[in-house]
Image (cartoon, rainbow, N blue to C red):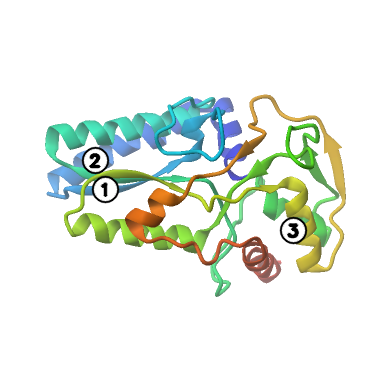
Amino acid sequence: MRCLGLCGESVANPTLYYDNNVIGSLVLLEAARAAGIDCVVFSSSCTVYGLPPSMPVTEDMPFAPISPYGRTKVIVEGMLRDYGTAYGMRSIVLRYFNASGADPDGETGEDHDPEPHLIPRALMAASGELQQLDILGTDYPTPDGTAVRDYIHVTDLADAHVRAVRELTAGAASDTLNLGTGTGYSVRNIVAAVERITGKIVPVVESARRPGDPAALWAAPGRAHARLGCSFPHSNLDTIIATAWAWHNRTR
């Protein structure tokens, strides 16, 4: 699950996140204002919702972040609202769900060290690069007991950003949009898809869940569809995993 690495790191080292996300954003906004730039697209996160009271997650649900990562995103969203009021700077805030997959042409992909995210780790386990994939929690109130998340392909994320920039440069008003497909996949769904696409077994070890992890998290995507015309054509699970697998093989 994508945000878990960032969220966990932010708990261990909040200074890094407040410096980069909050102070860095303030410096950038002031530079943009000085240069006469009057609109901004901001990459936010579904972590601003924390543990939502119901599914799917809509943009009007209250902020309830449970990590410094999520809290810094909330702060920057507030900064953008204040800059809109004071200086007329318009913004479209895009709240990512689980960014995943890789460039279909194989030029770029996920490459973290260490790698915290579920799909790359499942591929690493399938290829023998990892001894096992740890499934953290099998007793969630979900159909198969494992956590459910909404995965969106990076190509569809990039397309949404281009659409948001075009909206703003055409004079559109500010908005906040979830970037998710509205479909949730469990950890076991991911493992099964990786095994089907790679033709390899993913060795798994079941462990206890981590405190604070939501059982399920998926978006209500209607507002992004209506406002930007997003349809997320690359965000089916097979395409996400196939492109990630191609990238994995190219880099090994």
Q: Residue at (58%, 63%) from the top-left corner?
A: 102
Q: Residue at (51%, 50%) from the top-left corner?
A: 180
Is 86 left, or right, of 23 in this rendering?
left
Three-letter code for the amino acid on which mark 3 is drawn: Leu
Is 21 left, or right, of 175 in this rendering?
right
- Under tag 3, what secondary structure? helix
- Under tag 2, what secondary structure? helix
Where residue 223 appears, x then y in whole percent?
Answer: 39, 49
Total numbered badges shown on the rendered structure: 3
Determine which residue is flagged by label 3.
Answer: 123
Residue 16 in sight from this viewpoint: no
Mark before the other along the chain sequence, 2 or 1: 2
Report if the CB atoms under discs 2 and 1 are less than 8 Å apart. yes
User: Which quarter of the image is occupied by the C terminus?
Assistant: bottom right
Report if the CB atoms under discs 2 and 3 are less than 8 Å apart. no
Real-space Cα separation, disc 1 to disc 3, in angstroms: 35 Å
Determine which residue is flagged by label 2.
Answer: 29
Determine which of the numbered discs, if any, sits on residue 40 in the image.
Answer: 1
Front-most of residues 107 and 213: 213
Where residue 84 appears, x then y in whole percent?
Answer: 19, 37
Q: Residue at (64%, 26%) from the top-left corner?
A: 212
Report if the CB atoms under discs 1 and 3 are less than 8 Å apart. no
Where residue 40 appears, x then y in whole percent?
Answer: 26, 48
Three-letter code for the amino acid on which mark 1 is drawn: Val
Front-most of residues 204 and 31: 204
Q: Residue at (16%, 33%) from the top-left corner?
A: 85
Mark before the other along the chain sequence, 2 or 3: 2
Three-letter code for the amino acid on which mark 2 is drawn: Leu
Foreground mark, 2 or 1?
1
Q: Is residue 249 above or below residue 88?
A: below
Q: Is residue 141 above or below residue 228?
A: above
